[in-house]
Image (spheres, grey):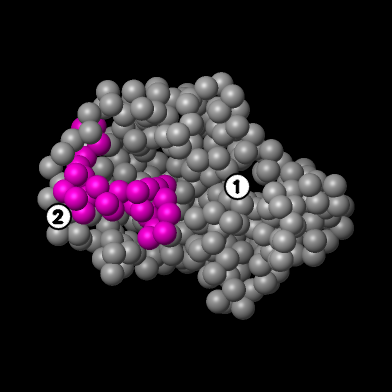
Amino acid sequence: MRVLIGGGGGFIGQSLSQLLKSRGHQVTIISRQPGQQKITWADVSTKGLPPCDAVVNLAGENVLNPLKRWTEQFKQEVISSRTDTTRTIAQAISRSPNPPHTWVVLTGVAYYPPSGTQQYSEDSPGGSGDFLSTLVKKWEDAAELPDTESRPLAQLVKVRTGVVLGPHGGPLNKMLWPFRLCLGGIIGSGKQPFPWIHIEDLCRLLCHTMEQEGKVGGILNAVSPSSLNDTNADFTRALSRALGRPAFLVTPSFAIRLLFGNDRAPMLLEGPRVVPHRTLQTGFSFLYPDLDSALAQLLS
């Protein structure tokens, strides 16, 4: 396949590009700057899509960047970095004389309301309430393609991911040194659900949706099967075991709220219990279905 990746220079994009190329696919990155095997967002907006079979958008400002104050300006950057890029691709697909067969947008399980008891599948309601769930709703709405009977457009797949665990980026990379120095521990109560997925499984799932050539559409939850019951305390204990280091410290809730603010703190202090029901129905199988197997591989 010829695959176009928006935001392909980031943590997930680099891993996805490597996996696609290892499977024999051609990859082009949509970037701010031109370069080899790259096109710019301005090109997509003005000239449309180059010939491609699938498009995936991973672009988005890091919501939990502690160096960014939670101002109205930064909130708008978070929204526009997701909705504007997604809408740019969707509009280019709708104008394309030969649209790709698959259009994948990677969003988040923050779409679902936080709950320690309620279980959420791909059919569960959400997208309203706090800033993050509303953000995901706007993000996914921006990916929608117009109804048309004149010619088929791309099959839209909305992949809602949990915390992505990988060795070269994401939250795990930032946690390793504190845990190795015996400074790790639970966040808040530790009872909050911890929906997660191994970076390799996420990239395999994205490949899986694209390689189905338009046969898989709709919403897919990108979370490991065990994360339905995993909590922040479970993750802390699993990481402590994998590193052979004690993790007895507690980061109190008020400190998280002070650092990240009331809109962002729920990402760490709360969470939904999510099941990848429809993801498994598509025939996808997880290489790392539980925390112990995932962390053993990531830390090997």
Q: Position of residue 52 (x, y in %)?
A: 75, 64
- Callout 2: SS: loop
Q: Nearer the viewer, mark 1 or mark 2?
A: 2
Sequence-first disc among 1 and 2: 1
Is residue 221 toward the left or the right of residue 2 in the image? left
Q: Residue at x 62, y 38 (%)?
A: 81
State the image quarter where residue 80 is shown: top right
> In the rendered structure, which amino acid carries the disc numbered 2?
Arg
Label tally: 2
Magenta-colored span:
162-189
* Towards the viewer: 243 or 138: 243
| Label 1 CA crowd tier, 10 Å (few <14, some 14–19, many 20+) | many
Residue 175 part of the magenta segment:
yes
Q: Position of residue 256 (x, y in %)?
A: 31, 29
37 w.r.t. 117: above or below = below
**Mark 2, residue position:** 245
Q: Residue at x 43, y 64 (%)?
A: 200
> In the rendered structure, which amino acid carries the disc numbered 1?
Ala
Residue 220 part of the magenta segment:
no
- Callout 1: SS: loop
**Residue 59: mark in rendering:** 1
